[in-house]
Amino acid sequence: MNSLPAIYQTRATYSKSRLDELCTHLTALQELKEYPGLTIFGAGSFARLEASQYSDIDMFFLTGGQGSEVTEPRTKQLRIFGKVIEIVDSMKFPSFSNDCQYLAVLSTEEMLATLGSPRDDHENYFTARMLLLLESYCLYGKPVYDEVSKLIVQSYFKDYPSHTQSFQPTFLLNDISRYWKTILLNYENRRILRKDEADYERKSRKHRVKNFKLKYSRMTTCFASIASLGSYRAPVTEDNILELTKLTPQQRLDTIPSRISDTRSEVDEVLDGYAWFLEMTGLQTIDLEERFSDEEKRTEMFEKANKYGDSMYKLLQKIDQCVPNSNLLRYLVI
């Protein structure tokens, strides 16, 4: 592997230290022991091992096979959530978003049964599934986490027996692309503001920061995974995908040249561009928002973000050119 910019190691060390402490607290909870078949994973900047002291923690709760055997599941869930909130507060993480709206236990069985259906989006299964594959870190229940990861990956390989020599994970590529477009749509829906609205300027700054992060971390989560998948020569196997799920988006990028040596310069350009983003997001929230109040600084930052997107696209182009019969860009467009 290429030596990543130093900030990656600094952030990874900090993230792992905080995650280890969180895992210790969770493992000690009696309430979790009384809920068999449960796994908890983190997502977001901590799962990507790039968190700063200002980062929040996103947590998802999934049940494996034993989850259906739990008596009084709702009561037990509420007790768990109460204890988890206490732990998050004691560790001085920012509060869970939207007044804990997304604290819920999701069933893996239901998630797989609704894959691709209208309920997939509505019940939050789609987001949980994508985050588990693209940027997750197990916080509790590793055996269940591994079991669930394998089951989800298997769901994308139903056609493999008929294409053992030529299989490409097109279904998974489509789902990742759909997830990226869903993120974009959600952003557009939430950013509509009226100029006469209270706190218009403050809300505008927050939306600019969200847009900035969208162009870096959200985009990288999706397209580092797409680029990595595209760098494998057919047939792509379940083990290949499971191997990728254990890596952060940056690590996925950094492994691409081991499969396609001609991509080293394109990968380095992406990694260097993302290192600058990490420097910016290491600022306190109010300081980062202030940068977007200054038109000159705002323009400069968004120009860098657009160039970063260009560098990711150049990498995808290079992969498409180097892998025989890849058709990666075609699959992403049509």
Image (tube, rainbow, N blue to C red):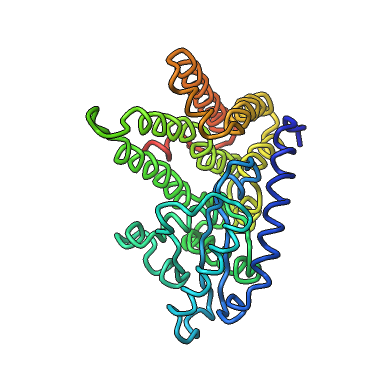
Q: Identify which residue, 196 or 321, lies in the foreground.
A: 196
The residue at 67%/55% (across/down) is 19
Residue 333 found in image quarter: top left
Q: Is residue 329 left or right of residue 278?
A: left
Q: Nearer the viewer, residue 118 or 196?
A: 196
Rendering coords of residue 105 (x, y %): 46, 69
Q: Quadrant of residue 202?
A: top left
The percent coordinates of residue 120 (x first, y second) are 36, 60
**Is residue 48 shown left or right of residue 106?**
right
Residue drawn at 55 percent across, 79 percent down = 35
- What residue appears at the point 53 percent right and 53 percent down from the top-left corner? 58
Res 188 seen here: yes
Q: Is residue 121 above or below residue 13?
A: below
**Residue at the extreme top:** 296
Quarter placement of the N terminus? top right
- Residue 113 vs residue 289, the one in the foreground: 289
Q: Is residue 267 left or right of residue 152?
A: right
Query: Residue at coordinates 63% horizontally, 78% vertically from top-left?
Result: 30
Residue 325: in sight, yes or no? Answer: no
Q: Tell me where residue 32 appears, x and y as whole percent.
A: 59, 75
